[in-house]
Amino acid sequence: MDNETKVLEFLLLGFSDLPNHQTLLFVVFLSLYLITMLGNSLIILAIAFSERLHTPMYFFLGNLSLVDMCFSSTTIPRLLRDLLSEQKTISLPACIVQVYFLFFVGSMEFFLLAVMAFDRYVAICDPLRYSMMMSQKLCLGLVSGSWVVAALNSTLHSILLSRLSFCGSITIHHFFCDIPPLLKLSCSDTSMIFPWAT
């Protein structure tokens, strides 16, 4: 351990085993990304501009569309850049930031789906009191609470990840940074920090 070199960047292999198909992959992923952005934007705009859709269910659906846009934007632009570039490296801080946003939007999606399930539960099981129970204040509180808890969750994971040391191999056999591949490259003891991933 005395002679280790610290890793400051990683090599994202992604689809490098398909060198002849990089342009085709770029077009496919760019098309899917643009369709995702357009579809979710149209959902948000429809909810924002239609008075009839100003209900709790559509409020949550609009937030879910925003989260889906953020989720796609966390990995796809980097993938598109790597498909056209010879240099497929990512710095350790950029990798940790990507993990932060992946965990943030991933957690947010889970919390929003739970909130949407609660909304549907109240609508089905107690329809007469639904509009009173699911007030605008409660809906804003549920969504705000989801954003805060998701941010705290991803902050905790990013802090724990930033405390790890990396040495030796710098190759990640993926097209984005994620905790399991990074733990495999870490020369720190990860069993106490991320026991679920070892």
Image (spheres, grey):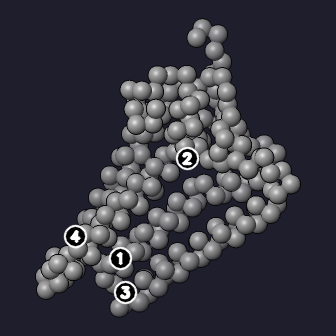
The residue labelled by disc 2 is 98
Which of the two labelled residues, at mark 4 and mark 1, occupies the earlier sequence position?
A: 1
- Residue 53: which disc? 3
The image shows residue 17 at horizontal and vertical percentages of 78, 46
Whether 126 is drawn above or below 34: the answer is below
Residue type, mark 1 in image: Phe
Q: How far, Cα to Cα, is label 4 from label 1?
A: 12 Å
Residue type, mark 3 in image: Leu
Which residue occupies 22% across, 70% down? Answer: 138
Residue type, mark 4 in image: Leu
Among the 4 quarters of the image, the one containing residue 23: bottom right
The image shows residue 96 at horizontal and vertical percentages of 54, 40
- Residue 59: which disc? 1
Whether 41 is drawn above or below 1: the answer is below
**Quadrant (top left, top right, bottom left, bottom right) of the N terminus:** top right
The answer to whether 142 appears left or right of 188 in the picture is left
Residue type, mark 2 in image: Gln
Which residue occupies 59% across, 29% down? Answer: 185
Q: How far, Cα to Cα, is label 2 from label 4?
A: 31 Å
Label 4 secondary element:
helix
The image shows residue 144 at horizontal and vertical percentages of 31, 62
- Residue 138: which disc? 4
